[in-house]
Amino acid sequence: MSDMVDFHIHTDRYGGDLSAKDIFEEIQKKPISIFSITDHEEITELPKSLNEMSIQPLYIKGIEFTCTPNDIHMLGYFPQYVSEEVKNLIERIKSRRIMELVLSIRLLKKAGILVSANDIIKKYHSISYLDINKYIVSLGLADNVNQAIERFFLKGKIAYFSRWYPGVKDTIHAIKRSKGIAILAHPLRDNRYKDIEICIKNGIDGLEVYHPVHNGTHIKRLLLICKEKNLLVSGGSDYHYIIDKLGYYANGKKIVRSLVNCFVERLINEKNNLNE
């Protein structure tokens, strides 16, 4: 029986190791009935060959935004459509990122690290913040991407600069005006209760309760907040690399539909409204 779900998955478009098609094929091997790909600042489409069919499991378009203040991560789900407002927000972010990438390369070169945009594009067929850090790893200047970020891009490091992000209020409202659902990702990462308060004040629809960074105590507290504030409960693996973790929020703990059923029902109802 397909009783598992997963609403937080990343592809090779941002940090993952599999394409959207590969993700879909892996999910088909599991008892997952509904899922969403939530790449950062990008709506990832399934291949047209899949969209043309009445595919199972059910796919919901999603995205993960980073917002101010506090680098809050906001998940947006679009069971009906992605509005021009959301598309314009994404394009605005991408334009800013291009300017920031140019600045990153300039700062690295100033520090004597020979990073070339052409070389990065030739190697990865794209250029992004992630690609720059992967290239730094390939130069032997770091063991992995996280280490590259820590060595060169964190505050006080040679390539640090203040990046632009949209405000949490504007992001939530853009998602909801697109008949989407706004969910705060991994709310208790670093015990950030203040982020929950900010998002509730600005009209968040729910919280990602079931996530790998949350322990049992976190989950109990988040479930209580959702009950008190009438918020939806969601869950996701935050998949990047380990296939076995698709559909799980912790080792051996499945994200079963019953844990997040109100959220699932809301998504399905909204999608059905589009088809009527």
Image (cartoon, grey):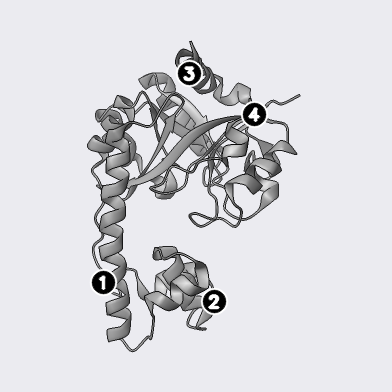
Q: State which tag comes first along the sequence, 2 or 3.
A: 2
**Left of 4 or right of it: where is 69?**
left
Identified by mark 1, the residue type is Leu
Q: State which tag comes first along the sequence, 4 or 2.
A: 4
Residue 270: horizontal and vertical position, in percent?
46, 17
Callout 4 secondary element: loop
Identified by mark 2, the residue type is Asp
Where, by quadrant of the figure, is residue 131 drawn?
bottom left
What quarter of the picture does the N terminus occupy? top right
User: CB under 8 Å between callouts 2 and 3?
Assistant: no
Q: Nearer the viewer, residue 198 or 205?
A: 205
Q: Which residue is mark 2?
A: 143
Instruction: Give the Cα separation between the discs numbered 4 and 1.
Output: 43 Å
Q: Which residue is mark 4?
A: 55
Identified by mark 3, the residue type is Arg
Q: Which residue is mark 3?
A: 266
The residue mark sitting in front, 1 or 3, is 1
Instruction: Give the Cα separation between the discs numbered 4 and 2.
Output: 40 Å
